[in-house]
Amino acid sequence: MTQTSDRSERTRTERYEPASIEPRWQQRWAELGLYRTDLHDKERPRFYLLTMYPYPSGDIHIGHWYIITPTDAIARFHRMHGENVFLPIGFDAFGLPAENAAIKNNINPRDWTMHNIDNMRRQLRSMGATFDWESEVVSADPDYYRWNQWFFLQFLKAGLAYRATSPVDWCPNDGTLAREQVEGVDRHCWRCGAKVEKRNLAQWYLKVTNYADELLDFSGLQWPEPIKAQQTNWIGRSEGGEIVFETAPSSHHGGGAELRVFTTRPDTLFGATFMVLAPEHPLVVDLTAPDRSSKVSAYVAQAANRTEIDRLSTDREKTGVALGADAINPVNGERIPIFVADYVLGGYGTGAIMAVPAHDERDYAFAEKFGLPVRRVVAAPGDEDRPLDGAYIAHASDERLVDSGPYTGLAAAEGGKAIVDALEKVGKGRAAITYRLRDWLISRQRYWGAPIPIIYCDRDGIVPVPEEDLPVRLPDTVDYRGSGENPLARDEAFVNVTCPTCGDPARRETDTFDTFVDSSWYWFRYLSPEKAGAPIERALVDQWTPVDQYTGGSEHAVMHLLYAREWTKMMRDIGLVNQDEPFTRLFNQGQIIGLDGARMSKSRGNVVDPDDLVARYGADTIRLFLMFMGPWDQGGPWSPNGIGGVHRFLNRVWTLVLDAHGTDPGDKEAGRLADGETAAAAEGSLRSAAHRTLRDVTADYESFHFNTMLAKLMELTNALFRYRGTEIAGGAAWEESVRLLLLMLAPAAPHVTEELWSRRLRARGTSWSSIHGETWPEVDATAVVEATREVPVQVNGKLRDLVVVPSDISDAELELLVMAAPKVQAALAGQTPRRVIVAGGGRLVNLVVG
RNA sequence: GCCGGAGUGGCGGAACGGCAGACGCAGCCGACUUAAAAUCGGCCGCCCGAAAGGGCCUGAGGGUUCGACUCCCUCCUCCGGUACCA
């Protein structure tokens, strides 16, 4: 482009060109080591800011920017408050997608993962984020995952790990399948199309249910209420009773076998008209009458192929089969039929229920379908004989037991207790608590994970790998043979070992750890990623943890965030740390949804690559745009519409700082104060605007309301623009406002503010120092005060006028002024208000007439 | 299904129970320009009206209140999670 035209000579200021600014400052910051944290500094208050480490799917997409760049703004905001901020980053490098890519493209998962990490490091740096790269952790690194193995061995010693059999979704060709790998209502394998079966496998568990009650305690944690609610419901503590039924003798069965049920409603025991066993219940086979056996086993087989979600659906029509056997109700000796039905789960409670159709929705639906009796045993006074058209669940305080033998007439809650007490005396029941939470299954039949350090020996059984033999390394060569089956299982060199105890030939465990194991302690390792001999550096852990602020996606509300809490408690209990909780303050931001309306992920092919956006607008604009698009905890669909507006905002800031005295030929009023506005008044209102903005923006940063924070900075910018080129431009109030604007914007748009800051310093002949090393400014309370305010006046709740009054007016004076306003008089039409409401602080007046 | 969240102009969104629509996008008008872009200024929820002004409006339906986007009840739609995606 030629530079000799009239146009270019008219150009007064250099244009804002992020491409020439951003890489320069990023390099400078790196050279100065501005964001490397001195972990041993005990002078300044610490601020451990953690963001969920990304999975290296291949590219950093706009969703990563959405998580990370506001987190970086938080880091910079805290640095400006004099805190020693630690913001580390790493990669959650094990997991299924690497294996899928490896099978598809015939490459090694490690190569695929490491290549992706290299690319992502470059992209992460382009955000201008202040990560301390010296602390990076990669979970697939043997120096990291050896400690997963070590932790497991300690937990095993402490009795916190155990082995048990449980079913997995199984494809004959591809082995164990994840939920997302099972497709269609007929449940076939995504890769080969084969019908998915259940297969029982012996697998490793961590005893996290030990911590169920402790996990319900969130005291001392500043976590969002919805997340606490989800975890609480996930843990699902239920108080009730365990009641022992006995099987009744019949032609095929001698009777007398114990059938334990858990119920939250022992008060309804007299209303039990049948029993239901889960298809997985061990007594199903024994109790089934010979003539029912083919029907029952067909049903059990069918149930095994249903998902839990399907089974628990209250929408689905109830199914089940009678076993042809009865149970005896311990409270009244009554014989009731036993069914098997899939709405009862094997893994919850005792895997068996007493069914009380009158007082449980699912039991009611089942009773309707199978024509079973419904017997009401709880009723509010007067309702005893009212017929039921559905289960009666409501817990009115005046409910009484009815038709319940000696307990009739007792209040429901009291009756329940009395029934459990009485049964306990004869060994037929006890008060009990169950949880929905299950122990953590950590075994995965996958190659790309950390091997579980166990050896199976015919002579010695289960033998832990000796600690000095850690890490058990993943073999580098992988033979997938085009299927998803775990190749470790047929890797002879890996599997065949000698028993550490007896020296006989033995076999290695070929399952690997769940990747949630990796993410359950990575923030401890950030503090000493190179440490040999121990997973953590205790002194630094004591100094820096628990994490002060954690940020990450809300999709992790129950799994990762619960596992991390459990792991921390297990570490505490084996004496490794002295803390109960890992993350003091949590913020779960929403997710960026792709154009197809789904969460952005490489596998869906709906990711938006920010590289070309960065090339076009610069990182600062992308950062701001993502913060501006809405509340951070809400996320939303991605659309680049509006990005230009944010870019324009930065251009306006640029113009304000570098060209205070310029005017625009397009604006006739430019460069003049409004009629009747004095310079002193203009300066006063500018300072007031700047300090009110500072007050609000500070609060918005603290509460992560970045969208409104930017809206307020835009308003201040618009106010400054109105005074650009006027006699107050470049004056003290102007300079103060511009300075505040840059400081407030610095955490969010670090490059352009650094550039403008350095130019201001140069223009004043001051030596350079980074804006990011500046101290956050303080609000001048006297500047904030305004002399008058506008009070809305309503008549019967409808807005009729706005009255300008002095700010310090009393409610009585306000009422007088309001009544005198002509528009108010007109709206009242001669009527006298029946009531005058002056809303708190005189914010609004409502006159009630008629 | 269950648990959690969200529904506000053409669009993204703002609003301690107190002026609904801040801020921005798009659109329209004007200025600057030979022109376009960029830039600057103005208008901009819907309906009636030339205007002044009036009426209506926060997913649907009820309720509480002087007053409801906000609180309560019932329902609809979308998003996240539902234990082997991370």
Image: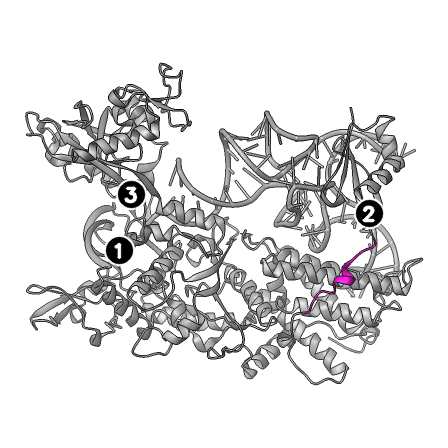
Q: Earlier in the sequence, mark 3 or mark 1?
A: 1
Q: Residue at point 84% right, 30% down?
A: A827
Question: Which picture quadrant has residue A479?
Answer: bottom left
Quarter occupied by the N terminus of chain A? bottom right
Q: Are marks 2 and 3 on the same chain?
A: yes
Please indicate whether residue A271 sits to the left or right of residue B34 in the image. left
The image shows residue A132, relative to residue A845, as above or below, that is: below
Residue indicated by mark 1: A207
Quadrant in the picture for residue A82: bottom right
Q: How many marks?
A: 3
Marks 2 and 3, how far apart at CA: 61 Å
Q: Amino acid at mark 1?
A: Lys
From the top left corner, tell me how far across and down residue A763 is, in percent.
77, 81
Relative depth, front residue between B68 and A507: B68
Please state the chain letter of the residue tagged with numbered disc 1 in the rendered image: A
The stretch in magenta equals: A777-787
Answer whether residue A778 is magenta in the image.
yes
Pointer 3 and pointer 1 on the same chain:
yes
Left or right of A410, for residue A557: right
The front one of B28 and A96 is A96
Q: Is residue A541 visible?
A: yes
A833 above or below A774? above
Kindly identify which numbered label has been placed on residue A809. 2
Q: Indicate the amino acid at tag 2.
A: Ile
Q: Earlier in the sequence, mark 2 or mark 1?
A: 1
**Image coordinates for residue A442, horizontal then vertical, percent:** 27, 58
- Host chain of mark 3: A
Magenta stretch secondary structure, dominant? loop
The residue that label 3 is drawn on is A434
Q: Which mark is on residue A326?
A: none
Image quadrant where residue A825 sits: top right
